[in-house]
Image: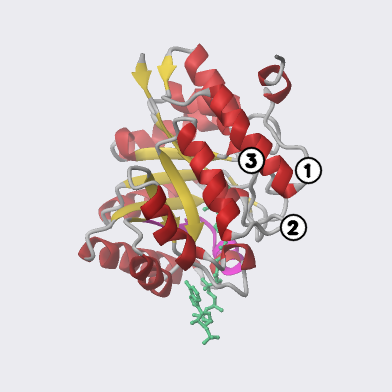
């Protein structure tokens, strides 16, 4: 079976918007359970303003604990600027992700910069990360629709993705921030992106607001993408993007991919342990579209 690579973003995207804030020990336990299920790559946290996202305020404590507890786990952290990179590096992070949105308003709402400044800061942060020997990812957020500006022009998405590629980002993560995309749009957009840059470096980061996450992931697979972000239990959402529901659930993606002839290395039963834990801690029912079937025994 052909392998696909899944980065579980639940410790970052999944927890950044929760009313109940998990402490560092609980985050570590969630990541341990993910690793036990076979997850080999996580986005563990973000080095952002603790005033803006208090749920991620313990990033500098979590990263070194994680490196000690799970040294083989590939661990990325989100950084919005050079200060975030500096903090991430000091904590021992080995991979960072910058976050560039494809519209002026989304950048202002998310990182308090306009589009031009966000491009400059992302390029500078990637260069500084490479100088430190770190691996890098670059998000291109609101790559389908922006909650403030409507449909995002495809040529701008392609231009920004190329810019991040030229800046040396190891992975360009095309994000459907508010989960508004359809399989037809994924086919069109990923097709255009794959014509402009190496498809092996493209990842997709889908939110499942309208129930099309799995169908969109399939469209991305058919377009040649083999790298996916997902979040166990389907938790997630950007606090600064109104209407952003949870991410495509890792368990739904694993089920779809494995049933379609792709190897994920992840055990569905193992993921149930992480979902049960997150449910208990967040005190609400979690799970993607397949959760009842997965719990059938
Ligand atoms: P700002 O207020 O414009 O920053 O915030 P500033 O440069 O004017 O500095 C203000 C204060 O923040 C200063 O401290 C800085 O030192 C500090 P003070 O002097 O007042 O004590 N500061 C920082 N502290 C910690 N870490 C930092 C940092 N930078 C400055 N990195 C800033 C700008 C970018 C910091 C803020 O807007 C921010 O933290 N934004 C992050 C928002 C966020 O986390 N959004 C969610 C993640 S993105 C997402 O979910 C989308 C994604 O999933 C893909 C998708 O689905 O589309 C990735
Ligand atoms: Mg997201």
Residue 116 picture location, percent across and down: 43, 68
Start-end of magenta stretch: 96-109
Mark 3 vs mark 2, foreground winner is: 2
Residue 30 picture location, percent across and down: 56, 45
The quarter of the image holding the C terminus is top right
Q: Residues within 10 Å of mark 2 (few under 14, many from 20)?
A: few
Image quadrant of residue 295? top right
Give yes or no for contact between labels 1 and 3 (Cβ–Cβ under 8 Å): no
Mark 2 to mark 1 CA distance (whole Å):
11 Å
Image quadrant of residue 223? top left
Choose the circle earlier in sequence order: 3 or 2: 2
Element under label 2? loop
> Does the magenta run of residues contain 106?
yes
Provide the residue designation for mark 3.
179
Of residues 174 and 189, the one drawn nearer to the viewer in this rendering: 174
Mark 1 to mark 3 CA distance (whole Å):
22 Å
Q: Which mark is residue 284?
A: 1
At 55% from the left and 27% from the top, the residue drawn is 270
Give yes or no for contact between labels 2 and 1 (Cβ–Cβ under 8 Å): no
The quarter of the image holding the N terminus is top left
Query: As drawn, is 137 to the left or to the right of 103?
Result: left
Of residues 277 and 126, the one drawn nearer to the viewer in this rendering: 277
At 62% from the left and 29% from the top, the residue drawn is 272
Provide the residue designation for mark 2.
19
Residue at disc 1, CB closer than 8 Å to ligand 2: no
Residue furthest out toward the right:
284
Residue 46 picture location, percent across and down: 50, 61
């Amino acid at each position: 079976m052909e392998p696909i690579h899944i980065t579980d973003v639940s410790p970052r995207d999944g927890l950044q918007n929760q009313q109940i804030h998990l402490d560092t020990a609980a985050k570590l336990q969630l990541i341990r359970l993910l690793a036990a299920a076979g997850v080999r790559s996580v986005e563990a946290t973000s080095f952002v303003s603790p005033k803006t996202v208090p749920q991620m305020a313990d990033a500098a404590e979590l990263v070194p604990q994680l490196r000690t507890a799970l040294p083989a786990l590939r661990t990325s952290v989100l950084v919005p600027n050079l200060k975030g990179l500096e903090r991430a590096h000091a904590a021992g992070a080995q991979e960072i992700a910058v976050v560039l949105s494809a519209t002026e308003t989304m950048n202002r709402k998310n990182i308090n910069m306009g589009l031009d400044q966000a491009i400059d800061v992302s390029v500078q942060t990637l260069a500084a990360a490479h100088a430190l020997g770190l691996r890098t990812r670059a998000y291109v957020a609101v790559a389908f629709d922006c909650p403030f500006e409507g449909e995002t022009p495809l040529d701008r998405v392609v231009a920004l993705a190329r810019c991040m590629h030229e800046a040396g980002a190891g992975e360009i993560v095309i994000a459907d921030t508010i989960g508004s995309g359809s399989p037809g749009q994924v086919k069109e957009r990923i097709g255009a992106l794959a014509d402009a840059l190496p498809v092996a470096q493209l990842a997709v980061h889908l939110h499942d607001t309208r129930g099309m996450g799995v169908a969109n992931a399939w469209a991305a697979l058919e377009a040649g993408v083999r790298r996916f972000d997902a979040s166990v239990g389907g938790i997630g959402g950007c606090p600064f993007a109104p209407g952003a529901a949870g991410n495509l659930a890792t368990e739904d993606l694993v089920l779809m991919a494995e049933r379609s002839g792709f190897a994920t290395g992840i055990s569905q039963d193992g993921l149930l342990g992480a979902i049960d834990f997150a449910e208990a801690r967040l005190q609400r029912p979690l799970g993607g579209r397949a959760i009842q079937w997965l719990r059938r025994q």
